[in-house]
Image (cartoon, grey):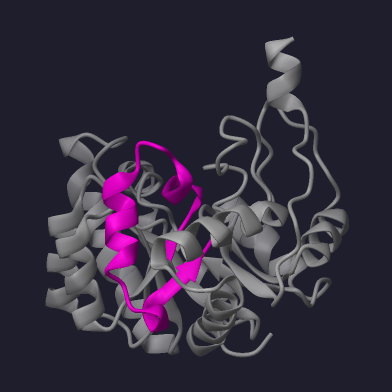
Amino acid sequence: MKDQQRSARPEAPEPLPVPVVDNHCHLDIQRDDAPQHPLSEVIVEAAAVGVDRMVQIGCDLASARWTHRVLDEHPALLGGVAIHPNEAPAHAAAGDLEAAIGEIADLARHPRIRVIGETGLDYFRTGPQGVPAQQESFRRHIALAKERGLALQIHDRDAHEDVLRILSEEGAPERTVMHCYSGDVQMARECVRRGYYLSFAGTVTFTSARSLREALASTPLEHVLVETDAPFLTPTPHRGRANAPYLIPLIVRSMADTLEVPVPVLCEALSANSEAVYGPW
């Protein structure tokens, strides 16, 4: 019964009053405990609750190729491509990291790919032996984003200091997004000082995430984005089930409560910020 409950699809939340963007999702990934739904259905159900635009992120070569392919078929999607930090050490060990990033650069020529990412550092899953490859890959992706004039989306897990240090050393692109922001208030203020955008996911709704909500509360509206990171990080009260863009309203309403702003005001800001980062759909 418990497994059936976890795999059951949550009901659609109340629609948002103003459409917003899911700033980061992985629509090619299926969780083992969830049924697969056609991409066209995922897009339609999201639009029905006010999530009419999405940024599909491909973070290994297979998903980057998939992202490149579907963008011409679905106007609601823009794309991002990169070698995820957890993929970089394996490519380095195989001797093909340079070639992998080269293919990412080729895919990023597509006019609807507006993001280099997610790139960055992950010291949770990769041990010390993988750090040099991660850092080299991160620097290469930063340079690529600047070369192409694209936004940069950053994955940062247990690596706050090094992420900020490398961005400072390399010079961050004009439009830099901290995907699934996980830092504290002090880091949020530093990111805002540098002009970065902070993207908040379903984690901000978790009961245990008080420090994350404090970071959100300290962030000006003009620096805030929202994402699902679907199919991961499903918001409360559906934590543990597969996530999807149609659940964004749950995150947005939680964020509005934390920021103490009306939901329509937050939605307007999220939409405007997204188009400022990625351009028009």
Residue 48 pos. (x, y %)? 83, 64
- Tell me what residue is drawn at x 49 percent, y 65 percent: 256
- Front position in the image: 33 or 245: 245
Say left or right for 52 vs 199.
right
Q: Quadrant of residue 243?
A: top right
Furthest-top residue in view? 1
Residue 227 pos. (x, y %)? 54, 60
Q: Quadrant of residue 83?
A: bottom left
Q: Is residue 84 above or below residue 231?
A: below
Say left or right for 63 vs 211.
right
- Tell me what residue is drawn at x 17 percent, y 72 percent: 190
Residue 83 magenta-highlighted: no
Say left or right for 89 vs 19.
left
- Tell me what residue is drawn at x 56 percent, y 34 percent: 239
Say left or right for 233 vs 180.
right
In this picture, which residue range is highlighted in magenta? 199-227
Quadrant that contains the N terminus: top right
Quadrant that contains the C terminus: bottom right
Residue 17 pos. (x, y %)? 71, 73
Residue 234 in sight here: yes
Q: Is residue 33 above or below residue 257?
A: above
Q: Is residue 38 above or below residue 90?
A: below
Q: How many marks?
A: 0
Q: Quadrant of residue 178?
A: bottom left
